[in-house]
Amino acid sequence: GAPVSMVAAIGNGAKHGILIKGAETINTLAQVDTMLFNKTGTLTQGQPSVVNVKSYDFNLATQEKLVAIEKESNHPLAKAIVNYLKIASQVVIETTEVRMGQGIVSRIAGETWLVGNQQLLAAHEVQLTEAMQADLLTFQKAGMSTVLFADDHVRAIFAITDKLRPNVTASLDSLKRQGIKQLVMLTGDSQKTGQMLASQLPLDRFEADLLPTAKAEIVKRLQKSGRKVAFIGDGINDSPALTLADIGIAMGSGTDVAIETSDVVLINADFASLKHAYGLAKKAQKNVV
Ligand code: ADP
Ligand code: MG
């Protein structure tokens, strides 16, 4: 059986809203020296709201198309847009393709509609005017996520903010003191948006504009260089990285798949329990030696 200290650690974790799957997880967690954090829904609450909209050619019929598309998505930004527009939609979507980390491509009445970031629009050769690019930059520099809606031209740009989770800064500081060498934010969001958020947190660095596969590549690269890596995410556009990491840590508010495949679950999605989990693992390891 597992050493008594491991069993005690699992029990203590449970009391603090931390689900630790198996004694081996405690061992590995104690060895972690690098923690990678997803941004949206992990460092932030994952309950974003629309704070600004630039519309260019965006009548009610066009808005209904966007609502129909975003209702099919479980992305937090999609929910923010649906909540903001507050309109019903009878629009029938013919097909929907999710471009992981970039957005959605839908067919409606034989026409292609795009919802997502600049890369998605660029891939479909949709041009942005200089005024639109200036709007995007302004929003992103203020730390907002941006979502564009377009067919053959841009119809609307949404600026969306999400609050940081409570206890993030104190928890990151504490993880550093407990021996984590590198704290890194990985985001599919833009460089500018990532920069603004990262500047508010005690992180060592961040990487932005990442597809889900790129997040997984970073995990692999760090492992090859000898690091023990924990990835903390919510399962939206970060499942490959969560699975590949030495320790996958899911926010309890995350997707079912993330919760099932991870090694540790922060049931209340509370950052204070992350530092507690790491502290428990370190203590249990000391008691075994
Ligand atoms: P993060 O890594 O921070 O969680 P994501 O990879 O989930 O970010 O998303 C990256 C970007 O892709 C978003 O900022 C947004 O512009 C776009 N995007 C992805 N899915 C959607 C969607 N369903 N609706 C609108 N925008 C989306
Ligand atoms: Mg995410």
Image (cartoon, grey):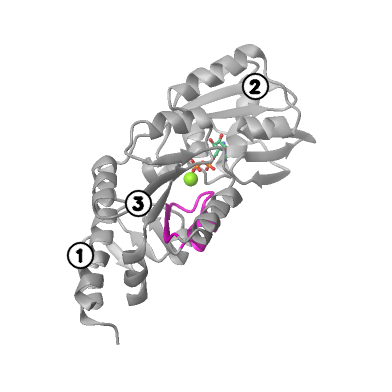
Label 3 packing within 10 angstroms: few (<14), some (14-19), many (20+): some
Mark 1 or 2, nearer chain start: 1
Q: Position of residue 226 (x, y in %)?
A: 47, 61
**Residue 242 colored magenta?**
yes
Mark 3 or 1, nearer chain start: 1
Q: Nearer the viewer, residue 262 or 183?
A: 183
Nearer the observer: mark 1 or 2; the answer is 1
Q: Position of residue 142 (x, y in %)?
A: 43, 22
Residue 145 seen by the camera: no
- Residue at label 1? 15
Position of residue 93 relative to residue 146, above or below, is below
Three-letter code for the amino acid on which mark 1 is drawn: Lys
State the extent of the magenta-drawn residues as a range.
Answer: 227-245
| Residues tagged 2 and 3 counted as in contact (Cβ below 8 A) | no
Q: Position of residue 167 (x, y in %)?
A: 25, 43
Disc 3, ligand 1: is the CB inside 8 Å? no
Label 2 packing within 10 angstroms: few (<14), some (14-19), many (20+): some
Q: Residue at x 50, y 27 (%)?
A: 192
In the orientation shown, which residue stands out farthest toward the front?
A: 225
Spatial separation of the CA atoms under disc 3 and disc 1? 28 Å
- Residue at label 3? 181
Three-letter code for the amino acid on which mark 3 is drawn: Lys
- Residue at label 2? 155
Three-letter code for the amino acid on which mark 2 is drawn: Arg
Spatial separation of the CA atoms under disc 1 and disc 2? 50 Å
Secondary structure of the residue carrying tag 1 is: helix
Position of residue 57 relative to residue 286, above or below, is above
Q: Residue at x 42, y 35 (%)?
A: 48
Spatial separation of the CA atoms under disc 2 and disc 3? 45 Å
Residue 263, by quadrant, is: bottom left
On the rendered structure, is 257 left or right of 148?
left
On the rendered structure, is 63 left or right of 76?
right
